């Protein structure tokens, strides 16, 4: 949430706490009691959405993805070099073509394309595993390359899910805050009309003024 949104929510929480501290003042005024509960439910929904928004921070997922990608690029290029050496010695033009890429070329690829190339090299290695042994390629290395590609694809998908969840929570918070603003304006009117305790009313509107209610006066001010 933005700072302004947090400030507004904190103001609403303070208002709800004021009600909680003085239940005897409003509990028997049915319309105020019912509407206060409605406002309180919205406040709780915003607090829940804020937690979801915080939990859906993609920073950690993005960092893990970047680290895994870097390891995959390095491993893929090293394996490809070994396969290219074998292809050069055996004059295998097909393998030379499949391994004809630079380290820098891998850097600019999208994740899906990078993983696709990695799986091409994995399949090539499996087809020529026995011949590649003297070039330093064994089953463990091939499995590691495959696992890195699968891990990157999984992290990429998880990051997208987290980003979508965060966007959804952010949009939900915007809607709830808009709803809360309308509800608090109605609650202002109800408090001003139906609550007879001047001290309660004055403190209520002082809490509301933390976020500025223009043109609103307490009943005490009206009588002065």
Image (cartoon, grey):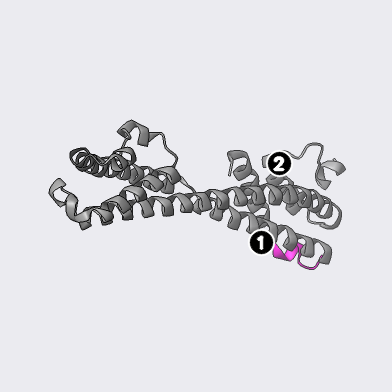
Judging depth in this view, the residue of 163 and 155 nearest the camera is 155
Judging depth in this view, the residue of 51 and 93 nearest the camera is 93
Crowdedness near tag 2: few (<14), some (14–19) or many (≥20) residues, C-alpha within 10 Å:
few
Image coordinates of residue 33 in percent, x first then y, are: 77, 64
Q: Is residue 27 one of those drawn in magenta? A: yes
Image coordinates of residue 117 in percent, x first then y, are: 37, 45
Image coordinates of residue 181 in percent, x first then y, are: 74, 47
Image coordinates of residue 161 in percent, x first then y, are: 52, 53
Q: Is residue 181 one of those drawn in magenta? A: no
Crowdedness near tag 1: few (<14), some (14–19) or many (≥20) residues, C-alpha within 10 Å:
few
Screen quadrant of the N terminus: top right
Judging depth in this view, the residue of 52 and 159 nearest the camera is 159
What residue is rendered at 49% in x and 48% in y?
Answer: 57
What residue is rendered at 47% in x and 53% in y?
Answer: 158
Q: Is residue 186 left or right of residue 72?
A: right
Tag 1's secondary structure?
helix
Residue matched to label 2: 209
Asked if marks 2 and 1 touch (Cβ < 8 Å), the reply is no
Residue matched to label 1: 20
Distance from the alpha carbon under mark 2 to that under mark 1: 19 Å
Screen quadrant of the C terminus: top right
Q: Which corner quadrant of the image does residue 22 belong to?
A: bottom right
The magenta-colored residue range is 21-29
Tag 2's secondary structure?
helix
């Amino acid at each position: 949430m933005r700072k302004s949104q947090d400030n507004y929510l904190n103001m609403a929480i303070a208002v709800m706490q004021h009600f909680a501290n003085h239940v005897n003042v409003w509990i028997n005024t049915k319309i105020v009691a019912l509407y206060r509960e409605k406002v309180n439910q919205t406040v709780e929904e915003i607090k829940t959405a804020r937690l979801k928004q915080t939990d859906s921070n993609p920073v950690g997922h993005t960092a893990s993805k970047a680290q895994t990608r870097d390891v995959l690029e390095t491993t893929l290029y090293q394996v490809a070099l070994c396969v290219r050496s074998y292809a050069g010695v055996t004059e295998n033009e097909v393998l030379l073509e499949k391994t004809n890429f630079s380290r820098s070329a891998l850097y600019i690829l999208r994740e899906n394309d990078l993983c696709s190339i990695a799986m091409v090299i994995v399949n090539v290695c499996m087809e020529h595993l026995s011949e590649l042994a003297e070039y330093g390629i064994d089953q463990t290395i091939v499995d590691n390359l495959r696992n890195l590609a699968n891990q990157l694809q999984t992290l990429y998908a998880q990051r997208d899910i987290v980003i979508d969840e965060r966007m959804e929570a952010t949009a939900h918070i915007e809607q709830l805050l808009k709803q809360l603003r309308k509800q608090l304006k109605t609650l202002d009117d109800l408090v001003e009309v139906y609550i007879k305790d001047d001290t309660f009313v004055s403190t209520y509107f002082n809490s509301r003024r933390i976020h500025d209610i223009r043109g609103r006066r307490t009943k005490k001010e009206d009588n002065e």
